[in-house]
Image (cartoon, grey):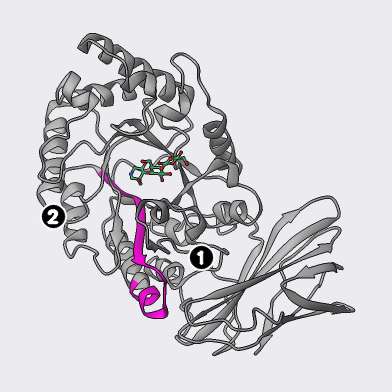
């Protein structure tokens, strides 16, 4: 459950059986290589003693989102659910529902949970930020918050982002409720209180723009060194890695290494690579190179124990609303089709022959929901470096499934053979674009994902 405090063991972890994914991505134009059997990222990471993580939204953990979150990742970070404003919106009145749900999902899928985050200047409840507190009151509030939240999940959290974003870009301390009220020692105190509440959890300081060697990362480095010298419990640093296309810092690996050399673990905690929209094949290829570079830098340093993306699908990313005109920052598109970035992470983790050749269109078949005897499925046709003017997707239902209804395509089933032709309005798939169609069907016993073949 816990990451190793010393260098991670470079051994193959047993479980190459991370559960059943109800998603298969298949190459349907260009060449005939199939991708359905790609090794999940979590298994590739395990071979390096790493975990592969994603931020998640609890309410979305069903259907294809839940299937992918469970199958591909070995660590989950609640994107918002464990922040103070989420868990204690009214003083003394707690809401743990989403956090509990994510922890339960993680336990059911043999995943770590990364707790995020205990002490931050943002997403605090208004009763806290609007209050007037003496420094003694503020200190008590913070200690109680940490004891309550860390204590609630004691034994269930592999690592906590105890303190989030304490620095300014120039390496000075950020002026916050905590720094202004308690001085710089709020950091040491928070770590000490967290250790007391869960001695087994790894304790991290997490920040952004600290991926390369710069003034901010050097301030973090100096802080970690001094905390260790003082005997304050600190186990790791989190490099958020909210990156811009083509801007992976050249000193990333060197920076990871210098923290490791201090005797702490390193986690890439919030990786995403945003681009100006619309995405096209050149941008997606650059993004893949960026993801590959970050993955490789983490793999290269034994103490880099966790590679976490901040949302795995473009439909669940903070980027689009925060940076209007930018997006497409994650490894899967909004229809859950793996992007070149997904294959790049896989390659960076040592996965073989997974990169789709340039100039290919792919189809992703997903079971989006399933109940008693029925299910809803979706197929997404995506192109990168190629385009289509019409398409026809075929598969065989090998377990007695029967199509009952389809939309955004004209589908027929004859015996076990299904054939779906584009509708009049979605035959054209541009380079960098995708189209989807959906269907309902019946099943019994099992509902395996079929291999889709394709004719344009
Ligand atoms: O801002 C990106 C990340 C930077 N590092 C710390 C992370 O905790 C932070 O995550 C983001 C979440 O991904 C967003 O989802 O933190 C944002 C807040 O600073 C989150 O955005 C908030 C929206 O601002 C709220 O309007 C919304 O109610 O998400 C909330 C829940 O959906």
- The percent position of residue 136, horizontal first and vertical second, equals 23, 9
Q: Which residue is mark 1?
A: 333
Which sits in the foreground, 45 or 145? 145
> Residue 221: x, y in percent?
14, 43
Q: Nearer the observer, disc 1 or disc 2? A: 1
Q: Residue at x 17, y 23 (%)?
A: 180
On screen, residue 264 versus residue 392, left or right, reads left
Q: Residue at x 60, y 51 (%)?
A: 66
**Residue 408 visible within the image:** yes
The answer to whether the beta carbon of the residue marked 1 is less than 8 Å from any atom of ligand 1 is no
Instruction: Please name whichever residue, 291 or 441, is drawn nearer the observer in this view of the structure.
Output: 441
Helix, strand or loop at disc 1? loop
Front one among 289 and 204:
289
What residue did someone put label 2 on? 213
Q: Secondary structure at mark 2?
A: loop
Q: Image quarter for residue 170? A: top left
Taking the image as shown, residue 429 lies to the left or right of residue 41, namely: right
Q: Which segment did they paint magenta?
A: 265-286
Residue 116 position (above or below residue 290): above
Q: From what the image shows, is residue 362 above or below residue 83?
A: below
User: Residue 380: horizontal and vertical position, in percent?
Assistant: 62, 71
> Up-down: is 126 above or below 342?
above
Quadrant holding the C terminus = bottom right
Work out whether mark 1 precedes mark 2 in sequence or the reverse, and give the earlier one.
2
Q: Residues within 10 Å of mark 1 (few under 14, many from 20)?
A: many
Q: Residue at x 35, y 62 (%)?
A: 274
Instruction: Name the quadrant where ligand 1 sits.
Output: top left
Q: CA distance from mark 1 to mark 2?
A: 31 Å
């Amino acid at each position: 459950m816990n990451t190793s405090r010393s260098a991670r063991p470079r051994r193959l972890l047993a479980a190459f059986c991370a559960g059943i994914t109800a998603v298969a991505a298949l190459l349907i134009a260009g060449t005939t290589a199939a991708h359905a059997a790609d090794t999940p990222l979590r298994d590739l990471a395990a071979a390096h003693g790493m975990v592969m993580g994603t931020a998640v939204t609890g309410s979305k953990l069903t259907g294809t989102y839940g299937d992918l979150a469970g199958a591909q990742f070995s660590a989950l970070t609640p994107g918002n659910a464990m922040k103070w404003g989420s868990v204690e919106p009214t003083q003394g009145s707690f809401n743990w529902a989403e956090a509990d749900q994510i922890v339960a999902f993680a336990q059911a899928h043999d995943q770590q949970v990364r707790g995020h985050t205990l002490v931050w200047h943002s997403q605090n409840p208004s009763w806290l930020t609007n209050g007037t507190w003496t420094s003694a009151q503020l200190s008590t509030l913070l200690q109680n918050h940490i004891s309550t939240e860390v204590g609630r999940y004691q034994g269930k959290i592999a690592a906590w982002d105890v303190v989030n974003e304490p620095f300014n870009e120039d390496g000075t301390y950020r002026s916050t409720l905590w720094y202004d009220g308690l001085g710089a020692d709020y950091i040491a105190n928070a770590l000490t209180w967290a250790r007391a509440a869960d001695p087994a959890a790894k304790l991290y300081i997490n920040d952004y723009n600290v991926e390369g060697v710069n003034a901010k990362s050097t301030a973090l480095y100096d802080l970690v060194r001094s905390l260790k010298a003082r005997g304050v419990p600190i186990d790791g640093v989190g490099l958020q890695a909210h990156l811009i296309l083509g801007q992976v810092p050249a000193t990333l690996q060197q920076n990871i290494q210098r923290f490791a050399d201090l005797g702490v673990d390193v986690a890439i905690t919030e990786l995403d690579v945003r681009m100006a929209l619309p995405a096209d094949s050149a941008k997606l290829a650059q993004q893949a190179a960026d993801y590959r570079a970050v993955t490789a830098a983490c793999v290269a340093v034994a103490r880099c124990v966790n590679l976490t993306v901040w949302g795995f699908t473009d439909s669940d990313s903070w980027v689009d609303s925060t940076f209007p005109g930018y997006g497409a920052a994650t490894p899967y598109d909004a229809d859950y089709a793996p992007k070149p970035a997904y294959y790049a992470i896989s390659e960076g983790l040592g996965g073989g022959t997974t990169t789709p050749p340039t100039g290919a269109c792919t189809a992703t078949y997903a079971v989006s929901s399933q109940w008693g005897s029925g299910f809803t499925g979706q197929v997404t046709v995506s192109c990168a470096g190629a385009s289509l003017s019409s398409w026809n997707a075929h598969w065989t239902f090998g377990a007695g499934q029967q199509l009952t209804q389809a939309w955004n395509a004209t589908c027929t089933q004859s015996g076990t053979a299904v054939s779906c032709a584009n509708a009049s309005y979605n035959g054209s798939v541009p380079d960098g674009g995708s189209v989807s169609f959906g269907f309902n069907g019946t099943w019994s016993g099992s509902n395996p994902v079929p291999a889709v073949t394709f004719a344009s």
